[in-house]
Image (tube, rainbow, N blue to C red):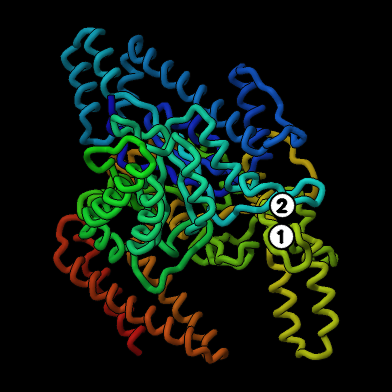
């Protein structure tokens, strides 16, 4: 039996730890969430903690065990699956015994929902227990437990200086760990194409459709534009692999790493997906059929289900409903606001208070990520303080115990992380040797570029340890957190029920009237990005980059023109904001032209 999702939103992956146990917290209510499977050390500790808490058998998986990374991930995902199923069964049982439990559950469902209407009718008409059992059996499902793999974080692993086969690379092992689990859910691939990893999917039967067109494991691609979706979707389809969902994320108005497009704005991208969805389906289906035929595998008679979802800066019920209705997306991702919901995410008290107090000026794109990609940051984290303290004591860099981002091979064949003390010491010694040949301003700039990199492997995991009162070993790194700019407009800790009701328009947890429309916020961010790029090119004088910048400007102007038409005709969703939005668009257009 195929079930419809109970909710029109999902909780995307956040950091390494912030959603690491979100399924245990929210999946029984039908809420889907995504966890990171990058940090197997964190995963092993979470597995031990939750096995003990829910009295499940636990077997430690040490680094001495062959393929320990994949096995740790499988074990934890199986633990999550078991706990969620048990909590879900207990919730259903409570409905049979308590009217209040049903009422509380109804209060969390979308206002227009088949199961909400059925449950309400059951209560109003005082129908039989058998009727209730039938409703629960036909409508109720737990939320999905999806996993995220950053495709480029695929570090090569070694055994006594000898490189292990490619299937032991970090991302490859994580995929294998997911495949071997009992989950019937999806892997979310982010950060672009990794052809070698994509090809590895071919080795697992779970990703191929059965004779009835079912998929045991599904693929979700996080993409920033239609072209990227078509290229990656076709690449996988040629291997007999179907992409079940394209998860569109704003290039800049998001949390975590920010992958700016060439000025393509969110609304324009969504419009293209809306207009060309059938083309995407037919193109990939045709290639899929050919590939499955060549592999002598079952061929679906009709195209498999394909969902389009969107995320990045959404903060009001009007924006949420607009995406569902106008762009026909299947679900909307709500990330950063849930960092202020203790029932949903794993964040320590100090960091949660920092997030609640944050203003627009406290949130910025930094260069602290060892991946060399702009990273959403917030001023005042303990990670920032401890990093500065080490620099002041001439001990720049991290001890780098995890090495997940040890991808730079300029000084070591096995790779070093650019945030590590070893790497920064080598770079700073080289810089010192060149000091006499440069100005103090240039020297300080290069010094800062080397030392600003932060240990994200530890910093993004510590909040979970603190939240669950687990000991933190090794060198102090504090907590790093990467919220989207949208967090500035959410100013207090709230319950899960209130946040869900906020999403569905039955409550409002935003206390500021200064919040811009999420399309306008993204546009402002792209204008700032454009200015910075223009300043950099003015110093560099690169013909290639100048051409790219001109393309960005043209795309931004086209996006503004699209928005002017869109909002001019909209009288349903943003009528109160309409004039201020149009004024913002006009001002942005003049700024770009001038």
- Quarter occupied by residue 265: bottom left
Total residue callouts? 2
Query: Badge 1: few (under 14), some or many (20 or more) residues near its Cα, within 10 Å?
Result: many
Quickly name the residue at label 2.
403
Q: Which residue is mark 1?
A: 417
Residue at image point 30% right, 74% down: 584
Q: Position of residue 44 (x, y in %)?
A: 66, 33
Instruction: Please state if 563 lies on the left or on the right of 174 as rendered.
Output: left
Q: Going by the image, does 503 lie left or right of 116?
A: right
Q: Are marks 1 and 2 in contact (CB under 8 Å)?
A: yes
Secondary element under disc 2, as helix, strand or loop, is: loop
- Give whichever of 569, 279 is nearer the camera: 279
Could you tell me if residue 283 is visible in this image?
yes
**Closer to the camera in the image, 436 or 508:** 436
Q: Is residue 343 above or below residue 350?
A: above
Q: Does residue 341 appear anywhere in the picture?
A: no
Q: Position of residue 499 (x, y in %)?
A: 39, 41
């Amino acid at each position: 039996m195929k079930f419809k999702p109970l909710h029109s939103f999902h909780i995307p992956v956040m950091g390494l730890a912030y959603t690491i146990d979100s399924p245990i917290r929210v999946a029984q209510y039908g809420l889907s969430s995504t966890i990171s499977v990058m940090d197997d050390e964190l995963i092993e500790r979470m597995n031990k903690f939750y096995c003990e808490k829910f009295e499940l058998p636990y077997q430690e998986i040490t680094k001495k065990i062959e393929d320990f990374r994949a096995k740790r991930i499988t074990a934890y995902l199986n633990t999550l699956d078991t706990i969620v199923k048990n909590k879900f069964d207990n919730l259903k049982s409570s409905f049979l015994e308590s009217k209040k439990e049903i009422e509380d559950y109804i209060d969390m469902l979308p206002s227009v929902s088949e199961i909400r209407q059925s449950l309400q009718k059951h209560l109003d008409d005082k129908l039989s227990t058998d009727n209730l059992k039938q409703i629960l059996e036909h409508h109720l499902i737990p939320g999905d437990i999806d996993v995220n793999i950053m495709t480029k974080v695929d570090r090569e692993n070694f055994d006594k200086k000898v490189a292990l086969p490619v299937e032991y690379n970090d991302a490859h092992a994580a995929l294998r760990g997911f495949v071997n689990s009992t989950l019937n859910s999806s892997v979310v691939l982010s950060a672009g194409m990794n052809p070698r990893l994509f090809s590895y999917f071919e080795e697992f039967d779970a990703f191929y459709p059965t004779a009835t067109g079912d998929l045991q494991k599904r693929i979700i691609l996080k993409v920033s534009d239609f072209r990227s979706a078509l290229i990656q979707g076709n690449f996988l389809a040629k291997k007999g692999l179907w992409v079940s969902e394209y998860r569109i994320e704003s290039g800049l108005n998001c949390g975590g790493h920010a992958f700016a497009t060439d000025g393509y704005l969110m609304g324009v991208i969504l419009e293209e997906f809306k207009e060309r969805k059938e083309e995407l389906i037919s193109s990939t289906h045709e290639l899929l059929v050919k590939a499955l035929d060549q592999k002598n595998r079952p061929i679906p008679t009709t195209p498999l289900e394909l969902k389009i979802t969107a995320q990045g800066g959404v903060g009001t019920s009007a924006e949420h409903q607009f995406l569902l209705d106008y762009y026909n997306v299947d679900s909307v991702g709500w990330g950063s606001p849930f960092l202020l919901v203790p029932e949903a995410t794993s964040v320590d008290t100090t960091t949660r208070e920092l997030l609640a107090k944050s203003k627009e000026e406290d949130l910025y794109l930094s260069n602290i990520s060892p991946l060399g990609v702009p990273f959403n940051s917030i001023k005042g984290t303990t990670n920032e303080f401890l990093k500065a303290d080490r620099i002041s004591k001439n001990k720049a860099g991290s001890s780098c115990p995890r090495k997940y981002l040890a991808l730079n091979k300029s000084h070591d064949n096995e790779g070093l992380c650019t945030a590590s003390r070893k790497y920064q010491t080598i770079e700073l010694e080289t810089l010192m040797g060149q000091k006499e040949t440069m100005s103090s301003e240039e020297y300080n700039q290069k010094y800062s570029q080397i030392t600003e990199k932060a240990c994200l492997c530890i910093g993004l995991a510590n909040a979970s340890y603190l939240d669950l009162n687990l000991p933190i070993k090794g060198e102090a790194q504090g907590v790093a957190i990467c919220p989207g700019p949208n967090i500035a407009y959410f100013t207090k800790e709230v319950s899960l029920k209130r946040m869900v009701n906020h999403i569905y328009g039955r409550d409002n947890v935003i206390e500021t009237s200064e919040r811009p429309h999420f399309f306008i916020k993204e546009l402002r961010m792209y204008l700032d990005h454009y200015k910075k790029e223009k300043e950099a090119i003015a110093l560099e004088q690169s013909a290639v980059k100048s051409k790219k910048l001109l393309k960005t400007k043209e795309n931004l102007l086209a996006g503004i023109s699209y928005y002017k038409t869109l909002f001019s005709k909209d009288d349903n969703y943003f009528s109160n904001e309409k004039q201020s939005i149009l004024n913002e668009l006009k001002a942005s257009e003049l700024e770009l032209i001038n």
